[in-house]
Image (cartoon, coloured by chain):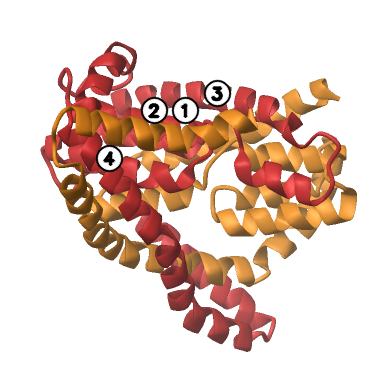
Chain colours: A orange, B red
C-alpha cells in the first residue's frame, strides 16, 4: 500500500511531463502559466477561510463543547456508546486540526490499538472537514447561495459516525 | 445558511467565554485567527501552484481530455448536467483520485479547477448548481484508500499494525459516500419543486 502511494506522485508527474513533451507543447511555459493561477486562487480563498477560522476558533476554544459533553455523557452510557468518541465525531466536520489533536490525545491516553482509539481513527479518517471544504470551494469561486449543500454534508457525517459505531466492533 | 452558522458560532462561543470569565482567551482568539489563516494559506499555496502547473501541462497536451473521455461513462450518471467530454470530468476525476491516495495537497487545486469549470457551466453565478453540490458531497465524504495522516500518527505512537484502519476507513467512507449521493439526489429533486 505504502509503495503504491509513494510512487503515485512521481509517476503522475513523469507521465504528464513526458506526454506533454511527446505532444510537442512547450512544457515549461505551460507549467509556469498554470502555476500562476495559484496566486489569484489563494487570494480569493483567503478571506472566506479567514471568516470561517475566526468563527470556528472562537467556538472551539470557548469550552462550550466540554459543557455539552458533560451534559450528554449519562445519555451515551445508556446506549453503550463510548463517550470519549463524541468530541471527535463533533469536531470532524468543523476542524481538521482540532480533530487530529483530539486523536493525538486519545492515542497518548489509551494507546493507538485500543478499541476507543480505533473507533476515533475511523471517524477521523472516513470523512473530510465538511465546513472547510464547503467554505473553501464555494468561497473561491464566489458562490453566495449554497442551498442544501451543508445539510447534505452534515447529514452524511452523522450517518458515517453511526455506521462506524456499527461496523468497527465487527473488526474486533 | 453559512451566515447563520457563522453568527451562531461566534455569539455562542463568545458568550460562553465571557460568562466563565475567560475574556483573555476570547481576545487571543480574535487577534490570532488572522495569523492562523495566513499560515494555512501559506502552507497550501506553494504546492497548489506546483500542481496547477502540472495540471496545465496535462490540459494543454490533451491528456486531461483523454481522462475525461475515459471517465465520462462512469461519472455521467452522477453528473448528468455536465456536457459530454467536458474538461470538468478530467478535473473531477483527478480530484477524486488524489483524495483516494491521501494527497490532500494535490486534491485541493484539482478540486478548485473543477469548481471553476462547473462555475462556467453555472447559469446563476451566485447560486450553487446541482453539479457543484454533488461534487462537494463527494469531497466532504473524503473517500480514501490510504489515510496518510492517521497512519503516520499511529506509527508515531507505536501501533502494532498502523495501516489496519485503512480497510474499515475505506468501507465506511464508501458506504457514506453512496448514502451522501443518494440524499443529495433526493434533496435536489425536492429543491426543484
Q: In this rendering, which labeled residue sits more in front, label 4 or label 1? A: 4
Residue B156 horizontal/vertical position (percent): 77, 51
CB atoms at circles 1 and 3 under 8 Å apart?
Answer: no
- Label 2 environment density (alpha carbons within 10 Å; few <14, some 14–19, many ≥20): many
Q: CA distance from mark 1 to mark 3?
A: 10 Å
Residue bearing mark 2: B184
Residue bearing mark 3: B174
Secondary element at tag 1: helix
Residue bearing mark 1: B180
Co-location on one chain, circles 2 and 1: yes
On what subunit does the disc labeled 1 rest? Answer: B
On what subunit does the disc labeled 4 rest? Answer: B
Tell me if residue B91 can be seen: yes
Co-location on one chain, circles 1 and 3: yes
Q: In this rendering, which labeled residue sits more in front, label 2 or label 3? A: 3
- Label 3 environment density (alpha carbons within 10 Å; few <14, some 14–19, many ≥20): many
Residue bearing mark 4: B55
Q: Quadrant of the C terminus of chain B?
A: top left
Residue A16 or residue A87, whichever sits in front: A16
Q: CA distance from mark 2 to mark 1?
A: 6 Å
Residue B89 or residue B46, whichever sits in front: B46
Note whether B179 is above or below A106 in the view shown.
above
Q: Which mark is residue B161?
A: none
Note whether B129 is above or below A89 in the view shown.
above
Tell me if residue B138 can be seen: no
Amino acid at each position: 500500500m505504502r509503495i503504491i502511494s509513494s510512487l503515485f506522485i512521481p509517476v503522475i508527474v513523469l507521465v504528464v511531463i513526458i506526454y506533454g513533451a511527446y505532444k510537442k507543447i512547450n512544457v515549461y511555459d505551460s507549467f509556469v502559466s498554470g502555476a500562476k493561477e495559484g496566486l489569484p486562487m489563494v487570494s480569493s480563498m483567503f478571506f472566506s477561510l479567514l471568516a470561517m477560522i475566526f468563527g470556528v476558533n472562537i467556538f472551539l476554544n470557548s469550552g462550550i463543547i466540554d459543557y455539552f459533553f458533560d451534559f450528554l455523557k449519562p445519555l451515551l452510557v445508556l446506549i453503550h456508546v463510548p463517550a470519549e468518541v463524541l468530541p471527535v465525531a463533533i469536531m470532524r466536520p468543523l476542524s481538521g486540526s482540532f480533530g487530529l489533536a483530539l486523536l493525538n490525545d486519545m492515542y497518548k491516553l489509551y494507546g493507538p490499538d485500543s478499541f476507543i482509539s480505533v473507533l476515533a481513527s475511523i471517524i477521523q479518517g472516513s470523512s473530510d472537514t465538511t465546513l472547510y471544504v464547503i467554505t473553501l470551494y464555494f468561497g473561491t469561486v464566489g458562490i453566495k447561495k449554497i442551498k442544501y449543500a451543508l445539510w447534505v454534508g452534515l447529514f452524511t457525517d452523522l450517518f458515517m459516525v453511526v455506521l462506524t459505531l456499527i461496523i468497527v466492533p465487527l473488526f474486533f | 445558511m453559512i451566515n447563520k452558522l457563522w453568527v451562531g458560532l461566534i455569539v455562542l462561543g463568545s458568550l460562553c467565554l465571557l460568562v466563565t470569565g475567560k475574556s483573555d482567551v476570547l481576545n487571543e482568539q480574535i487577534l490570532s485567527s488572522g495569523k492562523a489563516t495566513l499560515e494555512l494559506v501559506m502552507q497550501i499555496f506553494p504546492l497548489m501552484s506546483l500542481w496547477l502547473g502540472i495540471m496545465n501541462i496535462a490540459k494543454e497536451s490533451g491528456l486531461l481530455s483523454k481522462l475525461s473521455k475515459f471517465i465520462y461513462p462512469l461519472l455521467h450518471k452522477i453528473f448528468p448536467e455536465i456536457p459530454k467530454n467536458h474538461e470538468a470530468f478530467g478535473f473531477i476525476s483527478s480530484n477524486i483520485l488524489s483524495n483516494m491516495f491521501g494527497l490532500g495537497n494535490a486534491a485541493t487545486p484539482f478540486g478548485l479547477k473543477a469548481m471553476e469549470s462547473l462555475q462556467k457551466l453555472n447559469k446563476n453565478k451566485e447560486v450553487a448548481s446541482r453539479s457543484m453540490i454533488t461534487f462537494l458531497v463527494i469531497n466532504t465524504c473524503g473517500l480514501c484508500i490510504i489515510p496518510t495522516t492517521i497512519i503516520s500518527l499511529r506509527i508515531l505512537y507505536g501501533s502494532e499494525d498502523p495501516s489496519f484502519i485503512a480497510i474499515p476507513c475505506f468501507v465506511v467512507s464508501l458506504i457514506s459516500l453512496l448514502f451522501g449521493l443518494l440524499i443529495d439526489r433526493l434533496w435536489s429533486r425536492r429543491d426543484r419543486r
